Amino acid sequence: MASLPSFKEVVAWFVNRPAENPTRNALMWGVAWLIISAIGGWHLYLAPTSALGYDLFGYMPLLWHLAINVALGIAFTLPFILAALIVNHQASIVETFSRLLFAHWPAVLMLLPALAVSGNRYALLNNNLRVAFELDATSATLFALLLAVVVMWIVRWAYVAFRKVTTRGGYVGLMLFGVALFVAAVATEWALQLIYGAI
C-alpha cells in the first residue's frame, strides 16, 4: 500500500505546479481561468482593471467579458514571452504562454469578496482600502489579506513558470523576471484602458 505524501512533499508539489504541469494541461487550466473570470465578472457586473483587480462596471455582454479577459491574458504573458526569448532563443512561445497563463489564474479569487458584499462596497474595497477600513475594518482586513495572498501566489507561480521556460535561475534570472513582471503589470493596465476607451 502506497504511503501518503508528507506535508513537505505536498507543499513542493503545489509550489512547483507551473513547472511540472504538462504544457497542454497548463494551457487548458489557463483557458479555464479566462472563461471562469469572464463568466464570474459578467454575473457580478465586474470587469478586470489590472492583472489583479476587478471593479464594478455594470452590464456588458458575455462576449465582451471573454474578449477583455483574453486581451488581459495576452498582455500579461507577452512581456514574459519576449524576456524568455531574449535569454533562451529556443524557448517555446506556446509553452511560455501556457505556463504563465496558468500561473495567473489565482487572480480569479479576487472575485470572491463580491459574493459576500454589495457591488458598491466591493468597488470601495478595490479602489480605496483606507476609507473601506474606516467603515468596516473586518471586511477591509480580510480583503487586504486575500489580496496579499493572491499577489504572492501569482508572483511565486509566475517565477517558477518563467524559470522553467528560460532555464535561468540566480540573480540574472530573478532580475529579468522582475522587469518582465513590471512590464506585464503596466501592459495589462494599458491594454485594458484602450479597450474600455473603445467600448
Image (cartoon, rainbow, N blue to C red):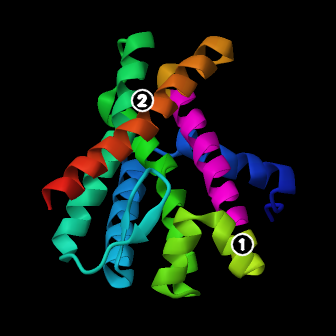
Residue 96 at what x, y percent from top left?
39, 33
Q: Which residues are magenta?
A: 144-164
Residue 124 at what x, y percent from top left?
54, 73
The reply to whether the C-beta atoms of the residues labelled 1 and 2 are less than 8 Å apart is no
- Note whether 84 is above or below 146 in the view shown: above
Pick the residue in front: 6 or 141.
141
Pick the residue in front: 29 or 157.
157
Q: Is residue 160 left or right of residue 38?
A: right
Residue 104 at what x, y percent from top left?
48, 50
Q: Is residue 120 left or right of residue 192?
A: right
Say which residue label 1 marks.
133
Task: Say if residue 138 shows up in the picture.
Answer: yes
Q: Amino acid at mark 2?
A: Phe
Say which residue label 2 marks.
80
Residue 153 at what x, y percent from top left?
64, 50
Residue located at (35% from left, 22% from top): 82
* N-term mark: 1 or 2: 2
- Between the C-alphas of marks 1 and 2, the distance is 35 Å
Q: Amino acid at mark 1?
A: Phe
Q: Secondary structure at mark 2?
A: helix
